[in-house]
């Protein structure tokens, strides 16, 4: 079976319009020959078979016609907007073998537009392995990632392609390129003889050009493309067919055999005149078998280079790249752990575990407060007590004191923090808060969102539900609007209980620290719902807000931290060659 027929190979930008559809776009059939391929692409030159009756008989238009309202070519050009426009008659519509369009391979277009190194990196990116290594927050997790990496890479590694056995495919009478008649200016048709070569392994890699090879290889249409540069600007059909045949010397498609939809093959062809067919028979002067084997060896060289580059990439380049990324991540996490070590507290700074100060809902009766939910089915009853949970004042004071000590350490070691984002600083603060809890058997201070730390009631006392009784926001206070929006709508959007304790940690980069603090506090007093303020145990002010009947005590913690440094380009984080 022959491969699918296309005019320009596999081009995702191709639009297809049938000849009989021309009247629907305001054009007349008589303006065109039966098959038209207009190359109105980036090279501004028509490379396909073109037969446009434009300003005279059915001449071949090798350059875009002048833009005028009477030109069919100009009308088509305005429709396709300088993209490729392919027009087929009804009987010339492309038919995809095995419902798969063909793809030209091993040519100059593949070398220019589809490099193998790009494809290999795309496979790795789709696996999300590079993203994972840069989001690991724990050294033990990083060690596990490094241990599991070889098997993970094996799981995404494509099977190297190789060429299998060849076979005759099909014969298409008068379906080949038009060639000159010897001794005449006339053209004659040829018969196209297809041969198929089975592809084993990952067939998609055959559509890529190997760009990191250990031997010099050139696209198989190089000679014709170089030769065409010296041709006249007005190509005839023979010249166009010659270039097209060189570009599509090898194409990739499924075989279309019954029950073998997943079998892929490379197709090549020989175009023979009647006289050449006679000479290619038994005992003739043309040895097609030898010509095919020469062409097969050329294709095999390219496929072998594809296989070698893919193997070298997954065996050497990719493991080395991940090794550098893992070591870079390990250095970051080790330094971060060192920062956390500087925040160790002596015994007098070890604070008790947070406690809830709860009271039953006002006006509730005993019957309403205690509600058994299980029916008499032998299952233990689950009793939910309707409570107004809030963080105990003493616990809130402890949290403020711990954050004060942590903030003082941050200001003493600014170089360790200046390049960290809000989320990374919140990670360190949450780790510090959890580390100060004696005997805690769960993560009381949990992280959500970009820079938010919470205490949920059920992390302190079981059965109280997941209501947030403490909220900590971390913001680089670059402007008044930033700090105001941190309260409303962000902080207010978290409120789920009647009384909430909160800390707004403002990281101030300004040199005039005191002046900046006063400006940010003034901005917070303008937030709708502001009631009053007092000085807290940590020396920071506590603002009181009421929002939709819910009360918030907000400790405004202000910390000076130098501006983040501009990142320098680093080759250590670049992907393996080719991206």
Image: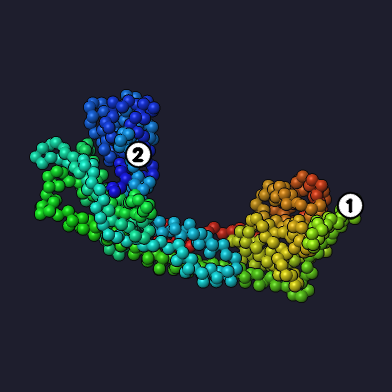
- SS category of the residue bearing label 2: loop
Measuring 73% from the left and 52% from the top, which residue is drawn there? 494
Residue at mark 1 to residue at mark 2: CA–CA distance? 76 Å
Residue in view at x 22 percent, y 48 percent: 193
414 relative position to 498: left or right: left
Residue found farthest to the front: 377
| In the foreground, 70 or 451 | 70
Q: Who comes first in sequence, dot 1 or dot 2?
A: 2
Q: Which mark is residue 555?
A: none
In the image: residue 481, left or right of residue 281: right
Q: Position of residue 265 (x, y in %)?
A: 32, 54
Residue 364 numbered tag: 1
State the residue at coordinates (23%, 31%).
Answer: 59
Residue 343, position as x, y percentages in the image: 69, 70
- Which of the 4 quarters of the picture holds residue 467? bottom right
Q: Is 166 placed above or below 12 here? A: below
338 on left or right of 108: right
Q: Nearer the viewer, mark 1 or mark 2?
A: 1
Q: Position of residue 550 (x, y in %)?
A: 80, 49
Mark yes or no: residue 185 visible. yes
The answer to whether residue 228 is visible is no
User: Relative to 72, does residue 106 appear above or below in the rendering?
Assistant: below
Residue at image x 16%, y 37%?
A: 187
Q: Nearer the viewer, residue 565 or 427?
A: 427
As drawn, which residue projects farthest toward the top?
A: 70
Mark 2: give few (<14), some (14-19) or many (20+) Cα within 10 Å. many
Q: Residue 208 versus residue 113: which sits nearer the camera?
A: 208
Q: What residue sits right under mark 2 in the picture?
A: 84
């Amino acid at each position: 079976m022959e491969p699918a027929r296309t005019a320009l190979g596999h081009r995702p930008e191709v639009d297809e319009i049938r000849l009989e559809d021309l009247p629907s776009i305001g054009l007349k059939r008589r303006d065109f020959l039966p098959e038209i391929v207009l190359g109105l692409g980036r090279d501004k030159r028509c490379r396909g078979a073109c037969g446009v009756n434009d300003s005279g008989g059915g001449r071949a238009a090798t350059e875009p016609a002048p833009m005028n309202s009477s030109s069919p070519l100009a009308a088509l050009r305005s429709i396709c907007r300088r993209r490729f426009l392919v027009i087929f008659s009804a009987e010339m519509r492309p038919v995809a073998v095995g419902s798969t369009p063909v793809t030209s391979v091993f040519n100059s277009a593949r070398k220019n537009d589809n490099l193998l190194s790009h494809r290999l990196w795309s496979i790795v990116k789709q696996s999300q392995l590079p993203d994972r290594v840069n989001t690991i927050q724990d050294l033990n997790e990083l060690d596990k990632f490094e241990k599991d990496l070889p098997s993970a890479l094996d799981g995404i590694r494509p099977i190297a392609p190789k060429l299998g056995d060849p076979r005759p495919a099909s014969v298409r009478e008068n379906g080949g390129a038009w060639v000159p008649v010897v001794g005449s200016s006339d053209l004659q048709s040829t018969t196209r003889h297809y041969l198929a070569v089975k592809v084993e392994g990952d067939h998609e890699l055959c559509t890529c050009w190997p760009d990191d090879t250990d031997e010099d290889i050139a696209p198989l249409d190089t000679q014709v493309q170089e030769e065409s540069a010296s041709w006249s600007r007005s190509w005839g059909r023979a010249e166009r067919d010659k270039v097209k045949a060189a570009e599509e010397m090898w194409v990739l498609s499924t075989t279309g055999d019954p029950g073998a939809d997943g079998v892929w093959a490379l197709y090549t062809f020989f175009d023979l005149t009647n006289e050449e067919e006679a000479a290619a028979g038994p005992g003739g002067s043309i040895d097609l078998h030898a010509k095919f084997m020469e062409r097969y060896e050329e294709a095999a060289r390219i496929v072998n280079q594809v296989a070698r580059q893919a193997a070298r990439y997954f065996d050497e380049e990719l493991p080395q790249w991940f090794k550098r990324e893992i070591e870079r991540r390990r250095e970051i996490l080790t330094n971060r752990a060192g920062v956390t070590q500087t925040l160790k507290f002596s015994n007098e700074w070890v604070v008790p575990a947070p406690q809830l100060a709860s009271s039953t809902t006002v006006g509730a009766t005993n019957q309403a407060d205690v509600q058994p939910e299980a029916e008499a089915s032998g299952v233990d009853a689950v009793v939910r007590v309707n409570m107004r949970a809030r963080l105990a004042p003493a616990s809130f004071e402890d949290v403020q004191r711990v954050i004060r000590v942590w903030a003082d350490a941050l200001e003493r070691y600014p170089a360790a923090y200046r390049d960290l984002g809000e989320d990374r600083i919140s990670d360190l603060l949450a780790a510090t808060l959890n580390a100060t809890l004696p005997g805690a058997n769960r993560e009381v201070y949990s992280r959500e969102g970009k820079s938010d730390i919470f205490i949920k009631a059920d992390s302190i006392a079981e059965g109280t539900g997941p209501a947030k009784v403490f909220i900590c926001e971390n913001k680089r206070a670059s402007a008044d609007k930033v700090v105001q929006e941190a309260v409303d709508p962000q902080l207010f959007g978290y409120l789920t209980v009647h009384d909430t304790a909160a800390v707004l940690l403002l990281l101030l980069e300004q040199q005039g620290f005191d002046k900046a603090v006063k400006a940010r506090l003034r901005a917070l007093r303008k937030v709708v719902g502001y009631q009053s303020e007092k000085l807290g145990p940590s020396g920071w002010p506590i603002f009181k807000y009421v929002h939709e009947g819910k009360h918030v005590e907000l400790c405004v913690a202000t910390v000076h931290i130098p501006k983040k440094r501009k990142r320098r380009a680093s080759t250590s984080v670049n992907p393996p060659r080719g991206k």
